[in-house]
Image (cartoon, grey):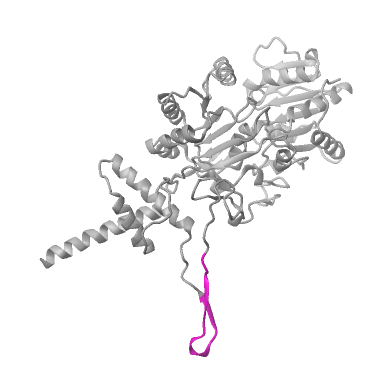
Amino acid sequence: MLNIEPRDKQVVALNMLRQAWNQHRTYMLYAPVGFGKTAVAAFIVSGMLSRGMRVLFIAPYTVLIDQTVQRFTEYGLDPYDMSIIWQNHPSFNPSKKLQIASADTLIRRDMPEDIDLIIYDEAHLRRVGLLKEFKETNSRVLGLSGSPFSKWLGNYYEVMLKPATMKELIAVGDLSNYEFYAPVTPDLSNVKTQSTTLGVDYNETDLDRIMCGSDLVGNVVQNWLENGEDRATICFCVTVNHANFVMLEFNKQGVPAEVMTAKTPHDERQRIVKRFEMGITKIIVNVGVLVAGFDSDVRCIIYARPTKSEIRWIQCLGRGLRSADGKDKCLIFDHSGTVHRLGFPDDIEYEFLFDSETGMKKAMSVSKESEEKLPKECPSCKYIKPAGVYECPKCGFKPVHAENVETDESRGLRKIKAKKKEPTQEEKQRFWSELKFYQKERAMQGKPLSDGWCANTYKSKFGVYPRGLNDSLVETSPETRNYIKHLFIKFAKSKGYKRKAA
């Protein structure tokens, strides 16, 4: 008998599983961060054990086994019923009703016998050996995931159970609200892509070269100092090299930050987390290790790891969306441009699983049917506005829209044609911010450009001098760099012609 009661949405999940139990053998429970998937698993395990059935619970990583055992025990499951499949663990007993193992351990061993139900946590992670077992076994299989978007999942799970969405959990207070800001957007036009365990994503070597740039790292630190409100923060980086660079810059500014990577020993990870929870460490700078099983109170996310993967995006941001006493919101600073590509985490929703073998999608995106539904950046304060919001909710800035058609009745014909598009205030602000970024870049190279040069370059593009614009910096885009190069070439040629004439 467990000592916890299921929440409303957890009751919905359990009822959905009961209804699907006799119709299918494999199930995917799609439940966002903060839903309480481990608690739901405990309710299911308790019911199975009470009927004398055997359950295998698979944690995604070895480091999460102890945490799983601790949670199950806290919820009221008897430790005597648990067997730990891990090296020479003293609690290993193949006859116990509840077997707990990591995915990596099971791949190297034979599966336990006579299992009635397999529960696989973080089931969006592809473990080919396990998936083959899932297809060949007669056991029922329940996958748990807050982001079941992998293209192959429909090949292994027959039905998706979706008891709640992230928006719903935010609305009822089970998840924290958030505020999004995009202080800078790096130029990733020359970054290659590659296949990863989370789908197609950017090449990390290329990303490391770009994101380790002193300007980008400096922007991460400076923005947090100005806007981070001294909140407990997790920073996601590309590589160990990048993480160390960011940590050192924070430490130089007097901010206690530590690095955690896949090679950080388990005991040291626990000590880092403890110092973080005590407030001794203000920022944990990590490389891909705080995406599952990390439940500390995080009130700010620095996302400096560009990605194309919706799974990675949601898993990382989810670390900051857990609710906590006194927590009004989570600040999210996107230094990767990802919010412009993928949108807000609670707007990414699917109704079915993907099936890549047939080349058919069993899913339709609710939020990303068109680029128009992506959130937009306020050019004034860098706050990320939801799609369709005109006036910035934070600073009140209103973009100016111009007419785009005109009527021409020349030659006795009524002709409607597109009018030359007038640049919006947002486009003017972005161009000016990119010019100021370029000016700073040149100054650091010892080749300074004056404020007058910026103003005249702006005028050459828009026909007027800049007015009512702020000096915020945005990474200079390839288009703007080409425009500047064009002006330099034009100027050089004009000087050559003048010399010839003389």
Please provide the residue range marked out in magenta. 402-417
Left or right: 267 with respect to 64? left
Residue at position x 40%, y 25% from top?
A: 252
Which residue is at the far bottom? 412
Q: Is residue 160 above or below residue 259?
A: below
- 11 left or right of 471 in image: right
**Quarter of the figure with residue 442:** top left
Whether the magenta-drawn stretch holds residue 410 is answered as yes
Residue 91 lies, with reference to residue 14, above or below; the image says above
Residue 464 quadrant: bottom left
Give coordinates of residue 459: x percent, y percent: 35, 60
Quick one: 75 or 423, which is closer to the camera?
423
Please indicate, yes or no, whether residue 348 appears anywhere in the rendered image.
no
Query: Which image quarter holds the N terminus?
Result: top right
Outermost residue on the top side: it is: 90
Task: Tell me what residue is drawn at x 29 percent, y 53 percent.
Answer: 452
Residue 367 is left or right of residue 305, and the answer is right
Give the image location of residue 405, x and y in percent: 53, 73
Left or right placement of residue 88 versus residue 4 in this view? left
Is residue 95 within the magenta segment? no
Looking at the image, which residue is at 82% across and 40% down? 24
Q: Toward the viewer: 385 or 158?
A: 385
Quadrant occupied by the C terminus: bottom left
Query: 358 or 340, which lies in front?
Result: 340
The location of residue 434, given as percent across then percent down, is: 40, 50
The x, y position of residue 138, in whole percent, is 80, 32
Q: How many marks?
A: 0
